Image (spheres, grey):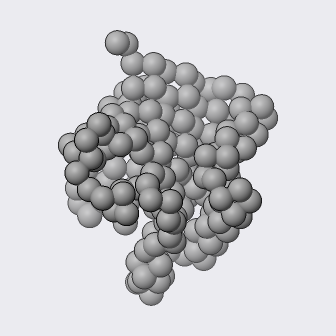
Amino acid sequence: MKHTIIDFKSMVESVRKDGRKHDYKIDKMIVYNDFLYYKRKYIDNINFKEVEYFLFPKENIGIYKLYLSDHPKSEPSFLYKYYVDMLKVEKYNEYWNSKDLYLDFISKVDGKYYVVDVDEFNDAIKKGELDLSDITSALNGLDIVLKGYYENFDIEKFISKLKIKYELDNELIHEYMEAP
């Protein structure tokens, strides 16, 4: 199971999965009560140079927006433009901890989109890794993403709508920018 901790003070995204830990330095971060945004470099990948992340705890979704490198090596049908995790978030004063709930929605550079990892979701249920609350959160998150996407067939408009909602309705908690 994957857990991600976004630490406000150290400006690090720490991803823990299968006994491995990867830390990624964040360049810019903005945190509201119910919305988090960050931007960082995409490390060690020839296809991508940068990633923006939009975390919406009430919707149970985290959206990665990926930026292609100048000379990607893979075909557009293999490259993600957006990757949406269904997740559950615990919020603390200095960090947020998200638990990946296996279901994902992806939008590729070629314009095609998919719901993926349904098999992993089912396996996690069978193994008892997900409780009823986790299952409900995952399905609610997927429902929100699909409805938001189908509204305009544009994930960017969906993100903008949620961002505006939380920027207007929530207090800004932290805004961090890495020194150049």
Q: Is residue 88 left or right of residue 51?
A: right
Residue 30: image x %, image y %?
55, 28
State the residue lying farthest toward the bottom.
126
Q: Is residue 138 visible?
A: yes
Residue 84: image x %, image y %?
51, 57
Q: Is residue 34 above or below residue 87?
A: above
Q: Is residue 110 left or right of residue 30?
A: left
Q: Is residue 97 visible?
A: no
Tell me how many marks there are.
0
Q: Is residue 43 above or below residue 104?
A: above
On the rendered image, what quadrant is the N terminus found in?
bottom left
Residue at 34% x, 12% y is 180
**Quadrant position of residue 149:** bottom right
Q: Is residue 140 above or below residue 171?
A: below
Residue 73: image x %, image y %?
22, 51
State the residue lying farthest toward the right.
169
Residue 133: image x %, image y %?
62, 70
Q: Nearer the viewer, residue 113 or 110?
A: 110
**Quadrant position of residue 14:** top left
Residue at 39% x, 18% y is 178
Q: Is residue 93 above or below residue 55?
A: above
State the residue lying farthest toward the top.
180
Residue at 50% x, 60% y is 111
Q: Nearer the viewer, residue 66 or 9?
A: 66
Residue at 39% x, 26% y is 27
